[in-house]
Amino acid sequence: MIVVIGGRGRLGRTLLHAFEGAASALDRPTYETWWREESIADIRRLLTSSSPEITSVVVASGVLDPGADAQEHFRVNVLLPKNIIVALQDTGISVVTVGTVMESLIAHKNNYIASKLQLADIVASQAALGAPVMHIRLHTLYGGGVPSRFMFLGQMAQALASDKPFAMTSGEQLREYHHMKDAAHGIRALMDAKGWGINDLSFGNPVKLRLLAESVFDAFDKRHLLSIGALNRPTEENYGTTFTKNDRIAHLHFRKPVDGVVQYMKTCVPQLRLGTN
C-alpha cells in the first residue's frame, strides 16, 4: 500500500486517484507534528506496523507560498520529510518527496525554493547510500481547483474575474505547465521505474509566459486588460533553459500547455465571478 502525506491538498488528492485504490492518506493531525525530532520513533512505529503493509510513502504536503515564513517552510518542507526518511531507514519502505525544477536554476532562492533544495540534498545523499528515496522536481502545476492568488494563473484569474488590468513583465520567462492529473500519472510512472535519487518530471514543452497570458486573455476577449512589460524584467529567471524530456514518462500523454491552461481558466474565472471558489 502507498501512503500519501498531504492527501487533502490538490496534488495529494490527485495522487490518491492516480494510484487507483492502492493508496490511502493519513489525517493531518497524525503527521502535522512530525517535523519534530522526537517524532521519529512514532513515525517508524506507525508506518511499519500498518496493515496492509506499507510499501511507499509519498510526501505531497508542503508550504507553497514563497511569502510564508522561512521557518514554516523549513519545518514542513524539510524537517517533516527528512524525519520520515530517517524513521524508515532499513525498513525497505520507499519515500518520495516533491520539489521544483527551479532548484537548479535560481541562484538567489526564495523561501520555497531554498527549502526544496535543502530537501533535495537530503534525498540525494540518502540515495547515494542505497536508500530507496526519490525527490521529484515538478514544473508549474494547474488544476484541482481555482489557482492560488500568489500564482501567475491565480493573478490572471483574479484580474479577469474583476475586469481589472493585469500588469506583468515582458513575459519572456519559460515555463512548463502540467495539469495536476498528468503530473500525478508522471509521479506514478517514476515511482514504478524506481529511479532513486533526483528526478525531473519534465516533458520538454516549455511556453513563454507572454504567449500564455495573451492566449488566456484572448480567450475571454479581454486583451485590452493585459499590460505586458509594465513590470520590471526579473534578473534571475529561466529565459533559455528547456528541460530534457524524461524518458521514464515518455509513454504518457500530457496536455498541450496553452490549450490546457486556457480550458482550465475558462472553468476557474466564472467560479471567481460567482464567488464559489
Image: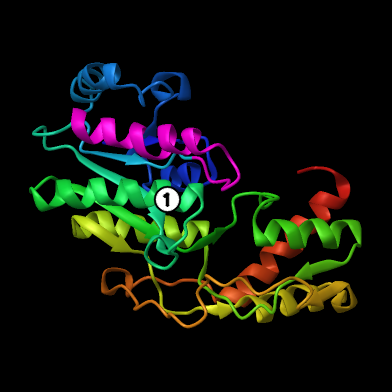
Whole-percent x, y for residue 198 in the image = 26, 59
Q: Position of residue 241 (x, y in %)?
A: 43, 80
Q: Is residue 212 left or right of residue 27?
A: right
Give the magenta-colored segment's residue range: 63-87
Number of marks in the rendered image: 1
Vertical comparison of 55 with 163: above or below = above
User: From this viewpoint, is residue 257 visible?
Assistant: yes
Quarter occupied by the C terminus: top right
Note whether residue 3 is visible: no
By secondary structure, the bulk of the magenta-drawn segment is best described as helix
Residue 263 screen position, x and y as percent? 69, 68
Badge 1 is on which residue?
114
User: Is residue 165 rendered magenta in the image?
Assistant: no
Residue 23 x/y as whole percent:
34, 38
Horizontal side of residue 35 vs 94, given as left or right: right
Give left or right: position of 102 versus 146: left
Q: On screen, 142 above or below 36? A: below
Quick one: SS at disc 1?
helix
Q: What amino acid type should be assigned to the residue bearing mark 1?
A: Ala
Residue drawn at point x = 37 percent, y = 59 percent: 137
Colour pattern of the rendering: rainbow
Q: How many residues crowd around disc 1 within 10 Å: few (fewer than 14), some, or many (20 or more)?
A: many
User: Quarter of the image holding residue 41?
Assistant: top left
Residue 78 colored in magenta in the image: yes
Position of 229 with respect to 127 (left or right) is right
Q: Is residue 234 above or below residue 124?
A: below
Determine which quarter of the picture holds residue 243: bottom left
The residue under the point 56% across, 48% down is 66
Which quadrant would the N terminus be assigned to in this image? top left
